[in-house]
Image: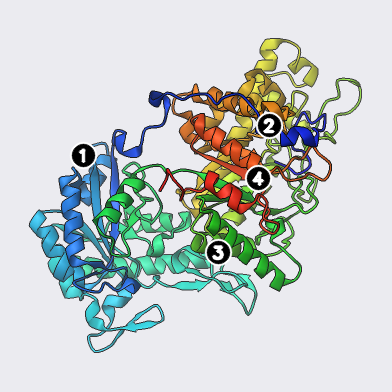
């Protein structure tokens, strides 16, 4: 939501006394047990899905966590736990057969994988699995196994005794058993490379290298050549040792890109494994998530991890302005970033929606961005560093928060224009009370938008995209020349008065605009995924009015059912004060919003309710009392909502107050842990 244009219907400021009474309201709606989301372990196992476990080293005593080692007796107990609890170990052949429409995978299918190529797989894990007749995947790093017997293995910056790693001869013997699939863990990409001017080292397979001398980034051509060379080398080595070409590629650190996925597919790889969350779908074999087993967990911890991994997870979100982090002084920027990361870590939430564009004036028009690109000035090359710090230090997923249409691109690209019903003869103009938007019907604007989103995708290892609330068209928009031509091509009238002339035509026009915006965001997401990876999720802001009053689609070109079908997450702006709801009725309004969405089967599982942490209607835009915000969160949960968040987070001023908000939003508090 723009800090200026926070509501289409912003008319009257609310008084402070109403704000302070926001906790008042009727009793919350009681949600019967059969209407609440069932715990993951009580739901049917999804068809053709598989739990994939990622193991590394196995040691008899004192498991060394530099190698993510698991104690041998605990590993054996974990395998027995899986068997006695109804899990069925499956092979790569079974997964590929299910993908091709053959025999479906059994319920509670599990695939066991072992990374890096440690000798302990050959000497400890394999004998246990062989006794159980359980298949597995063993994926060595080519360079590490190439190390001569008399030399240490360079494991990152550490020299490791050669005997910790297997030999190619042992790989051949294991492959000959027929029970183990030999996969690739790359030839020499299991390390970090410089990823940004601030000095972060990020996974070599998923990063465009930054050159501090030239202050430039590796080109896409050079990046693809580097990945392809590595794939060719490790494929040759495994084929020689195993007697057949490898089919499984395991990404170091679980980090992949869409470009790299396409390249390994050219080399015959049919399964790609990451370290993302959730069950793997045989229908998407090139991007299959895994559960990392580290810390040598005891049986209780192992069972909790497995059961938690099978659920979709709870989305708890803070939406963050990168404008608050940036400072002309790089030292102050670093201090601000440290404060943000610490706060997010302390909140113990799941997700951050992070601003990738600059909007210091708060008018909703992106004139600069925070990543290298070909289209707009770069305010600071800060997006990659912030994404990396949040993911690795605060352990959250990061979605790139981007406008859809409100960019100040150079040139004469068409802008959304509004026909003035009070002066029909006047030429149409951009609406001064709304976002200054590019016309979604202008091919030149689309080309620029696609290019900017592609550059954003190359810049940082994002987990998703949040499409901003600027993707709206009112009932008098769009009257630009490309829009009128698009209406004509679709068999509609090419003037706004004619489009509004009768209810049927008006409805067709409204649906055409809604679908156009959906199609545009889908196109942008497809280009992002082609570069960053198919794991990238989509979320889009939705105003509350089209949910509560479906006829208002005509005023917004937004439709709840469209959103639920098109995006991984629908993000309604559950902001009662912004929508002029008296504070005394805010609770009831939230209940109604949840109940309306609940009427669509399964919709609550794909909906993140975004609350307001600031009252934009009042002078100075003061923060909403943290106790009130926490109360709204608790209200949403009592009404049956599981996923929610807030905007904005002001980490510098502790707004909302962390100690007040954390018990209501954190996934680390009862009943989640």
Residue at the disc numbered 3: 389
**Disc 2 to disc 1: CB gap under 8 Å:** no
Give SS at disc 3. helix
Image location of residue 479, percent across then percent down = 78, 28
Disc 2: CA contacts within 10 A as few (<14), some (14-19) or many (>=20): many
Image location of residue 531, percent across then percent down = 51, 54
**Disc 4 to disc 1: CB gap under 8 Å:** no
Disc 4: CA contacts within 10 A as few (<14), some (14-19) or many (>=20): some
Q: Which colour scheme is used?
A: rainbow
Task: Measure the C-alpha gap from mark 2 to mark 1.
Answer: 47 Å
Q: Which of 524 and 545 is in front in this view?
A: 545
Quadrant in which the N terminus appears: top right
Give SS at disc 2. loop
Point out which mark residue 475 bears: none
Task: Measure the C-alpha gap from mark 3 to mark 2.
Answer: 33 Å
Q: Which of marks 4 and 2 is nearer the N terminus?
A: 2
Q: Count of labels shown?
A: 4
State the image quarter where residue 61 is shown. Answer: bottom left
């Amino acid at each position: 939501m723009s800090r200026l244009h926070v509501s289409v219907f912003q008319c009257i400021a609310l008084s402070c006394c109403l704000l302070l009474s926001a906790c008042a309201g009727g009793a919350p709606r009681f949600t019967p047990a059969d209407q609440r989301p069932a715990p993951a372990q009580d739901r049917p196992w999804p068809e053709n899905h598989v739990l994939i476990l990622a193991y590394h080293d196995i040691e008899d005593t004192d498991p060394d966590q530099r190698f993510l080692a698991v104690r041998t007796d605990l590993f054996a107990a974990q395998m027995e736990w899986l068997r006695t609890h109804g899990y069925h170990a499956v092979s790569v052949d079974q997964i590929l057969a299910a993908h091709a429409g053959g025999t479906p995978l059994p319920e509670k299918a599990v695939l066991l994988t072992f990374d890096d190529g440690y000798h302990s797989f050959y000497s400890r894990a394999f004998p246990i699995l062989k006794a159980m007749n359980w298949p597995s995947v063993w994926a060595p790093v080519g360079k590490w196994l190439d190390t001569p017997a008399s030399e240490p293995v360079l494991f990152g910056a550490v020299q490791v005794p050669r005997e910790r790693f297997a030999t190619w001869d042992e790989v051949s013997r294991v492959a000959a058993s027929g029970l183990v699939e030999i996969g690739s863990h790359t030839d020499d990409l299991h390390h970090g490379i410089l990823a940004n001017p601030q000095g972060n080292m990020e996974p070599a397979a998923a990063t465009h290298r930054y050159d501090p001398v030239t202050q430039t980034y590796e080109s896409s051509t050079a990046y693809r050549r580097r990945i392809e060379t590595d794939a060719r080398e490790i494929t040759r080595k495994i084929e020689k040792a195993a007697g057949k070409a490898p089919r499984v590629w395991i990404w170091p650190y679980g980090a992949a890109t869409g470009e790299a996925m396409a390249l390994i597919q050219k080399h015959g790889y049919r399964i790609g494994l990451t370290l993302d969350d959730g069950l793997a779908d045989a229908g998407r074999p090139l991007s299959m998530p895994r559960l990392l087993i580290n810390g040598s967990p005891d049986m209780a911890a192992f069972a909790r991890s497995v059961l938690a991994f099978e659920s979709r997870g709870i989305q708890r979100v803070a939406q963050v302005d990168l404008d608050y982090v940036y400072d002309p002084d790089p030292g102050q920027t670093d201090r601000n970033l440290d404060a943000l990361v610490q706060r997010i870590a302390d909140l113990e939430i799941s997700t951050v929606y992070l601003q990738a564009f600059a909007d210091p004036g708060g008018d909703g028009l992106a004139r600069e961005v925070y990543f290298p690109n070909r289209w707009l000035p770069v305010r600071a090359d800060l997006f990659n560093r912030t994404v990396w710090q949040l993911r690795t230090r605060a352990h959250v997923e990061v979605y790139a928060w981007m406008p859809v249409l409100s960019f100040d691109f150079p040139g004469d690209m068409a802008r959304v224009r509004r026909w003035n019903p009070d002066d029909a003869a006047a030429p149409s103009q951009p609406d001064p009370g709304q976002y200054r938007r590019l016309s979604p019907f202008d091919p030149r604007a689309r080309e620029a938008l696609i290019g900017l989103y592609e550059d954003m995708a190359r810049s940082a290892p994002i987990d998703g995209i949040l499409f901003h609330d600027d993707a709206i068209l009112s009932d008098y928009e769009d009257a630009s020349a490309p829009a009128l031509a698009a209406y004509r091509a679709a068999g509609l009238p090419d003037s706004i008065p004619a489009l509004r002339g009768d209810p049927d035509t008006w409805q067709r026009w409204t649906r055409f605009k809604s679908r156009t915006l959906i199609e545009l965001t889908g196109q942008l997401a497809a280009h992002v995924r082609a570069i960053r990876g198919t794991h990238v999720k989509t979320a889009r802001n939705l105003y509350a009015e089209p949910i509560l009053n479906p006829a208002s689609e005509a005023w917004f070109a937004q439709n709840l059912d469209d959103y639920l079908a098109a995006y991984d997450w629908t993000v309604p702006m559950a902001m009662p004060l912004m929508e002029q709801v008296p504070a005394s009725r805010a609770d009831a309004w939230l209940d109604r919003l949840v109940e309306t969405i609940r009427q669509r089967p399964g919709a609550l599982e794909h909906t993140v309710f975004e609350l307001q942490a600031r009252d934009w209607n009042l002078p100075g835009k003061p923060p909403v009392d943290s106790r009130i915000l926490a109360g709204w969160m608790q209200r949403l949960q009592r009404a049956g909502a599981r996923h929610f968040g807030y905007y904005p987070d002001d980490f510098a001023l502790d707004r909302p107050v962390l100690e007040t908000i954390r018990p209501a939003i954190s996934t680390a508090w009862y009943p989640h842990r």
